Image: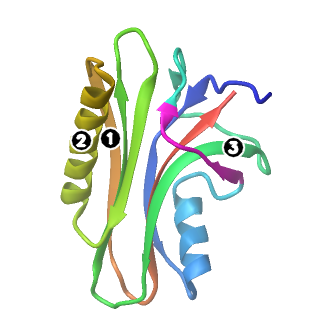
């Protein structure tokens, strides 16, 4: 049984690289999560988890993370990624992520709409939303990434 994460933060960053993988790696580094091992998870924030925007996770740690990213090698293309958390008053939260060929504003708007739908589907009241987004105009090979790392 894995322990339930107790802390989290939101991050969104963009970067260029000489390959798709290094563009992704550079976006991870720019988002403060480049030296940890991401374990991709679905989108539930545990009850009672505390927001810690200055959280430092030890290098090499295995970290449950909800994330979305897009990579493009089309010079001039606009790419964006966003992540958001919807909070209920007395229960768990819901995380949504989006990445695509659009503006940051559009990506963040999609996140907000998805959070509202997720809460409606669960019959829960949405009381607060946190969103982080980024956009990037591709030079050679670019990546836009948004994530919610969950920590103990």
Find residue 43 and report its horizontal and vertical position in percent: 48, 39
Can residue 53 be seen in this snapshot? no
Write the start and end of the magenta stretch as one range. 36-44
Task: Identify the element where label 1 is drawn.
Answer: strand
**Vertical placement of 96 versus 137: above or below?**
above
Q: Which residue is mark 1?
A: 131
The quadrant the N terminus occupies is top right
Left or right: where 99 falls relative to 30: left
For this view, does 99 lie left or right of residue 151? Answer: left
Q: Which residue reaches farthest top?
A: 90
Q: Which residue is mark 2?
A: 112
Image quarter of residue 25 = bottom right
Using the image, tell me which numbered label, if any, was put on residue 63: 3
Image location (x, y in percent) of residue 111: 28, 46
Badge 2: residue crowd in 10 Å (few <14, some 14–19, many ≥20)? many
Query: Which residue does the image show at 55% across and 34% down from the upper left?
Result: 54
Q: Is residue 85 above or below residue 11?
A: above
């Amino acid at each position: 049984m894995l322990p339930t994460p107790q802390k989290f933060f939101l991050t969104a960053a963009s970067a260029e690289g000489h390959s798709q993988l290094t563009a992704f790696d550079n976006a991870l580094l720019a988002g403060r999560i480049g030296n940890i091992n991401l374990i991709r998870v679905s989108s539930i924030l545990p009850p009672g988890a505390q927001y810690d925007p200055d959280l430092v996770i030890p290098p090499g740690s295995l970290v449950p993370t909800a994330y979305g990213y897009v990579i493009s090698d089309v010079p001039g293309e606009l790419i964006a990624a966003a992540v958001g958390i919807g909070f209920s008053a007395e229960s768990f939260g819901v995380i949504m992520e989006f990445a695509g060929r659009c503006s940051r504003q559009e990506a963040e708007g999609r996140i907000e709409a998805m959070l509202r739908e997720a809460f409606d589907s669960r019959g829960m009241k949405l009381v607060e939303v946190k969103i982080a987004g980024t956009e990037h105009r591709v030079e050679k090979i670019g990546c836009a990434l948004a994530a919610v790392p969950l920590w103990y």
